Amino acid sequence: MDAPRTRVVRRPVHGVLLIDKPLGMTSNQALQKAKWLLRAEKAGHTGTLDPLASGVLPLCFGAATKFSQIQLEAPKTYEAVALLGVTTSTGDAEGEVLERKPVDLAALGPERLAAVQAQFTGPIRQVPPMHSALKKDGKALYEYARAGLTVERAPRDVTIHALNLALTQTDQAQAAIKMIVTCSKGTYIRTLGEDIGAVLGCGAHLVFLRRLDTGGIGVQRCLTLEQLEALDDGARLARLEPPDVLLAAHARVTLDNDNAGRFLSGMRRRGHWEDAAAVAVYGDQPRVLLGVGHVQGGELIPDRLLSPLEIQQIIETLPRATACGPTEAP
């Protein structure tokens, strides 16, 4: 007879866990593993990272889930390797080979790569790949692709903020292009690799993808799930960053207790603040995040607020959250 399974007693956990996601694991699998290890009640991630990609994956718990969309919109930096001379059905190593072409290495000198690099830097248009989760008529594109169907996709405008291309080789000594890409939300690195291969005249597909940074959060700050699992409970909780780690680009405003209470009730506050589209708002004593808003015409307008219970739990369980960020006096 099987032994009864031990029921995990969930608890309120508030903060952001910076995970270095391994290859072969979905973002949701990584989230559920971390949620189980932390015994957290509520969790979410900040946008999926493909199973074939590794790297930075911020996981949000409790109050931090209210700001996950902000990280989803943030620029991201990737390191990728595109194998030259081979195109596949998926744009990566999992797909079927569609075509092979010779690679003229003599034509891929620094000047040629610099020209291609310039061509793909700045605003560009991409046709989303069929093997993606984008939906058409309520159905994910990859569902059409698995059925052997190709449907029309409208090009999407994205921005490549920075791009560096260098000729390299794979482990099998095959010619490849190494790419370091900083890009806007919605950019498909697989498609970028394919498009660069097409311009070079030989085709290409992605064989390596790693996210190095998202919204200023670098991979060097992350830990693996194995490292998290090896820690005891207290050490796991200590690896949580406060929720405002997702708000690094926000201006800061600190309110006294009276104004903080009114702000939390949804009331606008007036002060000598410059207009700002994104503001992280803190209470003064103790110093703790209250929510986010924006300033217009000297008015601080609430946009997304923490609940009083969440704030109290943060004060009790994450005391370092009471001393985060520089003070901005009203």
Image: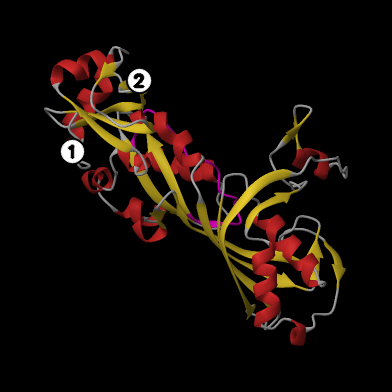
Going from the N terminus, do you reach mark 1 or mark 2 first? 2
Q: Which residues are magenta?
A: 38-55
- Secondary structure of the residue carrying numbered label 1: loop
What label sits on residue 161 in the rendered view? none
- Report crowding for label 2: few under 14, some 14 to 19, many 20 or more residues within 10 A (C-alpha): some
Query: Quick check: 286 left or right of 96?
Result: left
Name the kind of residue labelled 1 in the image: Thr
Specify the quadrant of the image occupied by residue 321: top left
Query: Quick check: 183 left or right of 264?
Result: right
Camera-side residue of 218 and 13: 218
> What is the chief secondary structure element of the magenta stretch?
loop
Camera-side residue of 119 and 175: 119
Q: Residue at point 55% right, 43% down?
A: 48
Question: How far across and how far down the image is residue 193, in percent?
Answer: 70, 62
Reading the image, the residue beneath label 1 is 327
Question: How far across and how far down the image is residue 30, in percent?
Answer: 48, 45
- Report crowding for label 1: few under 14, some 14 to 19, many 20 or more residues within 10 A (C-alpha): some
Q: Is residue 239 above or below residue 166?
A: above
What label sits on residue 301 in the rendered view? 2
Query: Quick check: 326 left or right of 50?
Result: left
Q: Residue at point 36% right, 45% down?
A: 17
Q: Is residue 157 above or below residue 120?
A: above
Q: Is residue 297 magenta?
A: no
Name the kind of residue labelled 2 in the image: Ile
Q: Residue at point 40% right, 43% down?
A: 34
Q: CA distance from mark 1 to mark 2?
A: 19 Å
Specify the quadrant of the image occupied by residue 42: top left
Camera-side residue of 78 and 231: 78
Q: How many marks?
A: 2
Question: How far across and how far down the image is residue 330, in percent?
Answer: 19, 28
Q: Is residue 50 magenta?
A: yes
